[in-house]
Image: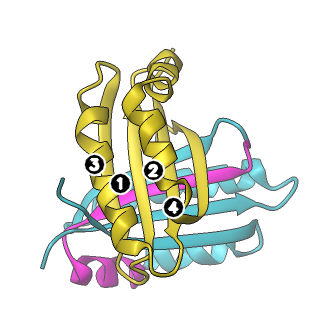
Chain colours: A yellow, B cyan
Amino acid sequence: MSAISITAILQAKPGKEQLLYQELVKAVTPSRSEEGCIKYVLHQSIENKAVFVFYEIWKDEESINFHIETDHYKQFRRNIEGLIESRQVYRLQEVDS
Amino acid sequence: MSAISITAILQAKPGKEQLLYQELVKAVTPSRSEEGCIKYVLHQSIENKAVFVFYEIWKDEESINFHIETDHYKQFRRNIEGLIESRQVYRLQEVDS
């Protein structure tokens, strides 16, 4: 089973940018500490400060399933629920070229 | 001037998935060969084979401006024009956490 990349794009509700920023930053360290996490990078859009993008690489499907069942991830999702306007998540396979 | 990351999400028109795939793969090697290119990775969605995501890291703004003026990039944009349903590009700064 090959590695799985995830791109997640989150947009803050108007006025919630800073709160969302803080919650997203909090999610990085515990996620990176998980055994199946290869890469976990948070970005903020240069053109629209309300837009944030995670780029993640996980060892396999099992690692992602473990991740989304962790207490820290569940708490994260609860914390951001009222702060986000939209959330798009893409599960990806890297194309060898 | 710090590095700039780019996430680009492209969706193929129905029936154009394979043609778009070929054009996207062709874009990787010449882009990676550019001096300002730190990372240039193509992905395909696991859930929707018509969706492709580039994750790129460029040394600085100048490197991106150089990239979009190259012959290979201009040809790439012409080649994919009739193949794509949508194209979203996010210019991003990595958040230190």
Using the image, tell me which numbered label, if any, was put on residue B33.
Answer: none
Marks 1,3: beta carbons within 8 A? yes
Q: Which mark is residue A26?
A: 3
What is the three-letter code of the residue carrying label 2? Asn
Q: Is residue A18 above or below residue A63?
A: below
- In which quadrant of the rendered view does residue B10 lie? bottom right
Horizontal and vertical percent for residue B26? Answer: 52, 55
Residue bounds of the magenta highlight: B48-70
Residue B46 visible in this rendered orientation of the protein = yes
Question: Looking at the image, do the residues carrying marks 1 and 4 touch, with CB atoms under 8 Å apart?
Answer: yes
**Which residue is depicted at the point 50% across and 15% down?**
A62
Residue B42 seen from this side: no
- Mark 2 or mark 1: which comes first in sequence? 1
Query: Is residue B79 depicted above or below A53 in this figure?
Result: below
Q: Are circles 2 and 3 on residues that touch, CB within 8 Å?
A: yes
Residue beneath label 4, please?
A10
**Residue B97: x percent and y percent?**
18, 53
Name, please, the residue furthest toward the left.
B1
Q: Is tag 1's residue or tag 4's residue first in the polypeptide sequence?
A: 4
- Label 1 and label 3: CA atoms lie apart by 5 Å
* Residue A24: mark: 1
Is disc 3 surrounded by few (<14), some (14 to 19) or many (20+) residues within 10 Å?
some
Which is closer to the viewer, label 2 or label 1?
A: 2
How many numbered tags mark residues here? 4
Q: Quadrant of residue A21?
A: bottom left
Q: Nearer the viewer, mark 4 or mark 2?
A: 2
Mark 2 to mark 1: distance in Å? 10 Å
Residue B62 image-quadrant placement: bottom left
Which secondary structure, mark 1? helix
Circle number at residue A79: 2
